[in-house]
């Protein structure tokens, strides 16, 4: 079975909700707070004012540049505030607060489950509708989808890779989406093929999802050019560089983008969002979130409206257990600790992971024993033990020479270190410093 070549680890899977069907969180909160920057790029600009009435799907903020994304209301009600609100990590972001009144949807959205296949749009029109719907990469990167579908002049893709790897432990929303919305995902893929004028598609799925591999293989056999590529289980295979090597054998050198090797990568959840945008006229106002953890009564895959408070979502699965040590947005490897449970679920929230005190307790750091394990597992061929030292000593020139900026922040080095050294924390800090230095240098040129 295929996989990437350098490094990688096999963390405990803990896919507790893999067999739990997606459930709609139908109870709505009294208020939602919708951030205007839920994507990589420029924040959207509000097009509503305090006191305005909105419906589910009403445009409330518009893109403010090429790399930006539209934002729509996920509820019906009244705009009560446009102000800065702290996000899940305590960072203040301009957001729109809406008081929920009923659940009235824009008439243009087709809520019927029936699939109408009589859509016949040009590639430009598909990209335009994707832009209008505010779709971003749902695998966690949240890059505005229309940007990826519009390569710069002179660059062309010959292959579209659908990222259905979901290699993060605990997360199961993509897996469930494939099992429950396979046909719709295939239509989304066909629309993406038309938008990008690409006639070869590879759907990468790891071998721990045999039911999804089987179903997607059957469904894709009816579409010319689409194939499923079962992948060996290895983290971080869902990262773009690793997935491209695993599925096509094409190597992405430092600083290059997928399009430089003729590839566009889209998450499987994004393909479903594209289906909804084009076929159902539905903007991106909700997403499937894996709400999980060993201490939770019933881990679930919940369809949650964007803007719903994280605390509200946790309450819907029985509330926070008394021994909770940490709540993570995303998976345990690349996710980040939530410091504000009143913050909202956003387009990028793939999971909410509740960890007990025991699970979240860090082991005491010991001296480096020079075992080389962190180097062995680094999928970017870096030397994490050395980069941690350089970051500790603020040796940014040397850290740049060691290509610290190539770090994916996958956390494999910290995971494997027998001395429990917080390698990722230091590498992440060092990377942000070096990136800042590089930005300042290029601004001076
Ligand atoms: S976090 Fe960075 S340095 Fe550590 S293994 Fe991943 S890519 Fe390598
Ligand atoms: S894995 Fe830990 S102990 Fe081993 S070389 Fe790396 S930092 Fe040192």
Image (tube, rainbow, N blue to C red):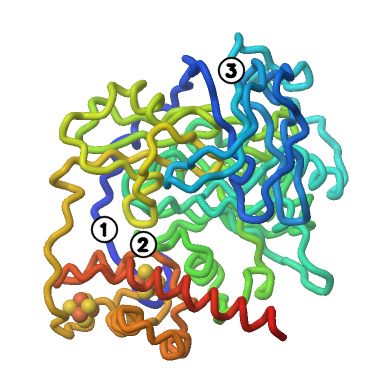
Residue position marked by numbered label 1 in the rendering: 11
x and y, in percent, of residue 338 in the image:
37, 44
Residue 412 percent across, percent down from the top left: 31, 67
* Residue at image location 61% in from the left, 76% down from the top: 439
Residue wearing tag 3: 99
Label 1, label 2: how many angstroms apart (C-alpha)? Answer: 7 Å
Front-most of 314 and 214?
Answer: 314
Q: Are marks 1 and 2 in contact (CB under 8 Å)?
A: yes
In this view, 369 is above or below 355: below
Is tag 1's residue or tag 2's residue first in the polypeptide sequence?
1
Looking at marks 3 and 2 on the same chain, the residue that comes earlier in the sequence is marked by: 3
- Look at mark 2 in the image and give the residue it sits on: 235
**Is label 1's Cβ within 8 Å of ligand 1?**
no
Mark 3, other Cα within 10 Å: few <14 / some 14–19 / many ≥20: many
From where the camera sits, is residue 333 visible?
yes
Secondary structure beneath dot 1 equals: loop
Q: Residues within 10 Å of mark 1 (few under 14, many from 20)?
A: some
Question: Where, quadrant-wise, is the N terminus in this rendering?
Answer: bottom left
Residue 84, horizontal then vertical, whole percent: 57, 39
- For the residues marked 3 and 2, what is the alpha-carbon distance in whole angstroms? 41 Å
In percent of the image, x 54 and y 68: which residue is there?
Answer: 244
Q: Is residue 375 visible?
A: no
Give me the C-alpha separation between circle 1 and circle 3.
42 Å
Q: Which residue: 35% across, 59% down?
A: 233
């Amino acid at each position: 079975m295929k996989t990437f070549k350098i490094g990688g680890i096999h963390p405990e899977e803990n896919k507790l909700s893999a067999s739990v069907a997606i459930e709609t969180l139908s109870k709505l909160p009294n208020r939602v707070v919708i951030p205007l920057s839920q994507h990589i790029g420029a924040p959207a600009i509000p097009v509503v004012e305090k006191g305005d009435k909105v419906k589910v799907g009403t445009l409330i903020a518009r893109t403010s540049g090429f790399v930006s994304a539209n934002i729509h209301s996920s509820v019906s009600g009244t705009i009560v505030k446009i102000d800065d609100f702290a996000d899940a990590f305590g960072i203040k972001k301009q957001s729109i607060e809406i008081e929920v009144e009923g659940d009235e949807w824009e008439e243009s959205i087709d809520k019927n489950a029936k699939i109408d296949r009589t859509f016949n749009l040009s590639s430009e029109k598909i990209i335009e509708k994707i832009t209008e719907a505010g779709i971003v990469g749902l695998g966690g990167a949240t890059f505005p989808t229309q940007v990826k579908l519009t390569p710069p002049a002179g660059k062309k893709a010959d292959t579209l890779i659908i990222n259905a790897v979901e290699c993060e432990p605990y997360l199961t929303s993509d897996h469930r989406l494939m099992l429950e919305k396979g046909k719709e995902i295939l239509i989304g893929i066909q629309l993406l093929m038309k938008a990008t004028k690409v006639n070869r598609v590879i759907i990468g799925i790891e071998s721990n999802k045999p039911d999804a591999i089987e179903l997607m293989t059957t469904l894709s056999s009816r579409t010319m050019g689409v194939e499923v590529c079962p992948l060996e289980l290895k983290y971080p295979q869902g990262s773009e560089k690793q997935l491209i090597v695993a599925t096509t054998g094409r190597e992405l050198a430092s600083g290059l983008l997928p399009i430089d090797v003729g590839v566009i990568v889209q998450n499987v959840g994004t393909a479903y969002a594209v289906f909804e945008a084009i076929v159902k006229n539905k903007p991106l106002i909700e997403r499937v979130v894996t709400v999980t953890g060993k201490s939770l009564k019933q881990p679930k895959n919940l369809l949650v409206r964007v803007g719903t408070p994280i605390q509200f979502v946790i309450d819907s699965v029985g509330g926070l257990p008394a021994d909770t040590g940490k709540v993570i947005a995303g998976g345990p490897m690349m996710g980040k600790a939530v410091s504000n449970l009143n913050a909202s679920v956003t387009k990028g929230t793939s999971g909410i992971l509740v960890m007990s005190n025991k699970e979240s307790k860090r082991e005491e750091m010991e001296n480096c024993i020079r075992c080389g394990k962190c180097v062995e597992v680094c999928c970017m061929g870096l030397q994490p033990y050395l980069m941690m030292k350089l970051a500790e000593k603020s040796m940014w020139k040397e850290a740049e020479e060691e290509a610290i900026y190539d770090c994916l922040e996958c956390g494999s080095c910290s995971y494997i270190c027998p001395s429990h050294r917080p390698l990722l924390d230091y590498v992440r800090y060092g990377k942000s410093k070096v990136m800042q230095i590089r930005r300042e240098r290029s601004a001076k040129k």
